[in-house]
Amino acid sequence: MKVLRTSVIGLACTVALSLVLSGCGKKDSGTSAGDRASNAEATYVAPGEKDEYYLFYSGGHSGQVFVAGLPSLRHIVTIPVFAPYPGTGYGFDVESKQLLGNYTWGDVHHPALSQTDSMYDGRWLFVNDNANNRVARIDLHDFKTKQIIGPLPNSSGSHASSFVTENTEYLFVSTRFSTPLPKGTVSELENYEKDYKGMVTALKVDPQSGEMSVGFQILMPPFNFDLASTGKGPSSGYVFFTSYNTEMAHETLEVNASQLDRDLGAIVNWKAAAAAVADGKGTKMEGVTVLDPATVPGIVHFVAIAKSPHGMDVDPTGKWVTAGGKLQPTATVLNVEKILTAIEQKDYEGDFRGIPILTHDKVVEGEVPVGLGPLHTQYDDKGNAYTSLFIDSAVTKWKLPPWTDAEKQDLTSVVKDKITVHYSIGHLAISGSDTKKPDGKWLVALNKLSKGRHINVGPSQPESSQLIDISGEKMKLVAEAYTEPEPHFAQILKADQIDPIEVYPQAENKNPNAVWELEDGIVTRTGTTVEAKVVAIRSRFSPDKIEANVGDTVRIHVTNIEQTADMIHGFGINEHNINIVVDPGETKTIEFVAKKKGVFPFYCTNFCSALHQEMQGYMIVRESGAVEPTPETGTPAPTVKTDAVDGIPAVPATENPDVDAPAPVEPNK
Amino acid sequence: MKRFLRAEYVFLQKPLNVGSRLLLLLSAVIVGGSLYFPLWKVHLEAPQYQEGLEMTIYAYKLEGGNGGQDLKEINMLNHYIGMKPISAADFTEMQVIPFMLGLFILLALRAAVFGRMGPVVDLFVLAAYFGMFSIGAFYFRLYTYGHNLDPHAPMNVEPFMPVVFGTQQIANFTQSSYPQMGSYFLCIFMLVLLLAIWFSRKEQLPSSLS
C-alpha cells in the first residue's frame, strides 16, 4: 500500500513537472561559461579528426539502425534493415527485396553486438523487429544487413530481443504479446488466460557465418515479457526476463495490467533447456521444438519483482541483476548466488502453472530507491550502476552491492548522484555495460521527448540524445543531439575494435552476372526475358541502351567496377520506382516487367564525378513483339519506331505487388 | 699533343690494384641491389585525394600504390582529359633496363678480372650514357602522355609536360616526381667506378709496356 502511495505521489509530481515544463518552456542549459568551454573541448571532434566510439542506435519504427560517433554525437550513416532506403538503394534490388520479404517497415528496439567470452568481438550487430517478429544480422565487416530471420513461428512482439549469450551461442527473443498458438488459431479474447501463450525463443547463431536459425522455444504463461539480459560468470548459462501483466489482462492493459504490486520475472537456464531439447524432451510446434517448463523442471523459475518492471540488466561481474521498477520508484537487485542456492534448495514460495516461484526475500538483495519510473540500468567499470528514470526525467547513479549492513538498513545511502535529462529518458547506454569489462567514460541518455530543446521544426519532432560524462564522481551533461524517430537501446563500440572494408575487392566478387570491362557490358534476350549486364564506372554505363518489349521481364545487373573508396554509383530508371545504389566492386540486380511503352532515361543517382550528370542511358520499351533486338554491347543500334498505344504504368515485378512495391502514384485529378 | 695521347694511352693500360678490383666487385653488388628498389616515384595529391596517389617505377615494372589501385585511379582521372592510360607495356625501356643492369654486372666483373683501367672507363661511359638516355626516354614518355590528348575528351586542357624531377601544380593536383633508392644505387655505382679509377691512377705499367 505504501508502494502504491509513493507511485501516486510520483505521478502527481510528474503531472506538476509537465505543467511547469509546458507552462514556461524554460531552457535548462545549466552551464557556466567555464563549463561551456570544457564541455566543448571534451566533445569536440575537429574537422579531419575522428570519433573514438561507434554508437549504434536502434531506429525504432523507422526500421533502421543509425550509426553515430562519440563523443561528437554526430550521425554518420544509416544502416537500412527492415525498411526500404532509397539512399543506399536498399529494398529495390532483388537481394534486399528478398531480405525484406513483403514488409516495408519494422520496429527496431534492441541492438546487440556479438560477443566472445563476454566481450564485444566486433563481428555482428543483431537487431530485433518488434512489429513483425524478426531479427536481423548486420555484418560489421561492411555495415550491411546480411540476414533477416522471421516472422518467427509461435512468437508475437519480439520486444525482449536481441540479447546474445556469452559466446553468441544463442540470441534470445521473447514475446511481448501473447496470442493463441500456433499462429492462425483464433480464440476469443475472453479465453486469454487459457488459450493465449507467451514464448521464449532461442535463436542459434552459427559461430562462423553468424547465420541465425530457430534453436528451440519455451512455452510461457501469457505475461508480457519485456526485456532480457544474459548471464556471465556465476550467472553463466542463464538469461533473465522481466514481464508485466501477471494479471493476464487482455483489455485496457494500462489499468488492468497494473493492479498487482509485483510481476513475475523469469530466470531461464538456457544450457539446461538446450540439453533438454537434445534429450528429446520437447514437442514440435510449427516445426520448432517447444519445451513446456511445467513438465521439464529446472529450466524456468520465476521471481516476483516490483512493479510492472521494465529493464533487466546483469552487471559486469554476473553477480547482480537489476530490474527497473517502472511503476515503483525502486530498482530491484537480485543476488545471483542466492538465486542459485534457492534453485538448488527448491526454496519456493509457490508456483505459477507448475513453474516454481523462488522465495522473494531469499533472492532479492535490496530495492534501491532510485527515483520515479526506473526503466533500464547500465554499469561502469567501478562498481556503479546508472538507472534511467522515465518519470523523473533523470539518471541516478548508485553503488552496486556488496553493501555494508548500515547501507542495507538505509539504501538511500548507496545512491550517489542524480542528473536531469531532457526529457523522459528510455534507455541509456554505456560502452561494454553488457560485457565483463565496461568502459566508464561516457553514458548516452536516449530520451523520448526533445520538445523545446531544438529550433522549432513543427509538430513532428525528433528524439533527443544526451552525452553524460561519467568519468568523475558526479555525472556531467556535456552535449546533446537529435535523431530521427526513434532510438530505443544503443550499443557503443570502441572504433579501433573493427576495421571495416571500404570497397568490395574485385577478386571477392563471385556474382556470375558481374562484368568488369566496358566492352563486356551486354544486353541479351532469351524468350521474353531481357538480361542486361551493365558496367558502371566514372562516368558512364556500358551499355547505355537497353531495349525491351512490353511484357518482357527485364533483369539488369549493374556492376560498379570502381575500386576506389566512396566512388559509389546509382542506377535509377525514370517512372519505374527503381533506384539501386552500387558500392565499389559490388554487383546488384533489379528485375521488373516492362509494362509501359516508351523511352525511359536511366541515370546515375549517386553523385560520382565531374561528369556525373552525363552518366545516363535509355531504356527503350517497344510494343509487344515489335522487334527482336540484337545483342547490345554498347554501340547503339538504329532505333525502330513503333506506333503502339500507351502501356499501363509500370510496377516492379513481384509475386505480391500489393505489398512489395508501392503502386504507381496517379497524378492528382 | 703527342705526349697527351701517349699519357692517355698509358693511363688506359694501367693495371688495377687490389683496392680498385674490390671496388669493382662492390659496384657489381650495388647494381644488383638497385633491382630491388624503386628508381622513381610520382606522387599526386589533391583536395579529395589527401592520402595521395602513387606510381612507382622499378627497373622492370610499374607499380600503383594501394595494391595497384592508385595507377587505375590515375588512369581513371586522366581519361577525362583524354590521356592514354599509363601502362607498363608502353615502357619498352623496362625490358631493356634489367638487361642493361645485368650487362653492367658482367662488365664490372670482367673489368675486375681483367684488371685494366680501360674496361672500367668503358663501363663508366656506358653507364653514364645509359643513365642519361633513360632519363631522356622517361622525359619523352611523359611528354608523349601529356601531349597526345584525345581531342574528343570531355575536358580540354592545354597539352602539358608532367614534371620529371620536382613538384608542380596541374589543375587540382600537386604532382611531384623524384628519384628513389634504386636511382641512388646507380649513382653510387658510378661513383664507385670513379673511385676504382682514382685509386689506381698512380699504378705503374709493367716495364715491358712502359
Image (cartoon, rainbow, N blue to C red):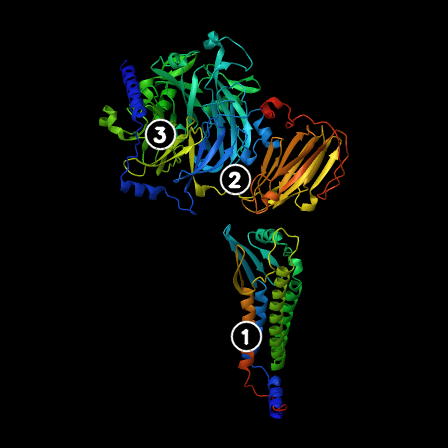
Q: Which mark is residue A483?
A: none
- Helix, strand, or loop for circle 1? helix
Circle 1 is placed at which residue position? B192
Extreme left residue here? A406
Q: x, y percentage for residue B121?
A: 61, 79
Q: Which residue is mark 2?
A: A141
Chain of residue at mark 3? A
Q: Chain ID for label 1?
A: B
Local crowd at mark 2 within 10 Å, few (<14), some, or many (≥20)?
A: some
Mark before the other along the chain sequence, 2 or 3:
2
Between residue A613 and residue A395, name the one nearer to us.
A613
Task: State the image quarter where residue A20 is shown.
Answer: top left
**Residue B186 visible in this rendered orientation of the protein:** yes
CA gap, disc 2 and disc 3: 39 Å
Question: Residue flagged by tag 2: what amino acid is it?
Answer: His
Amino acid of disc 1: Val
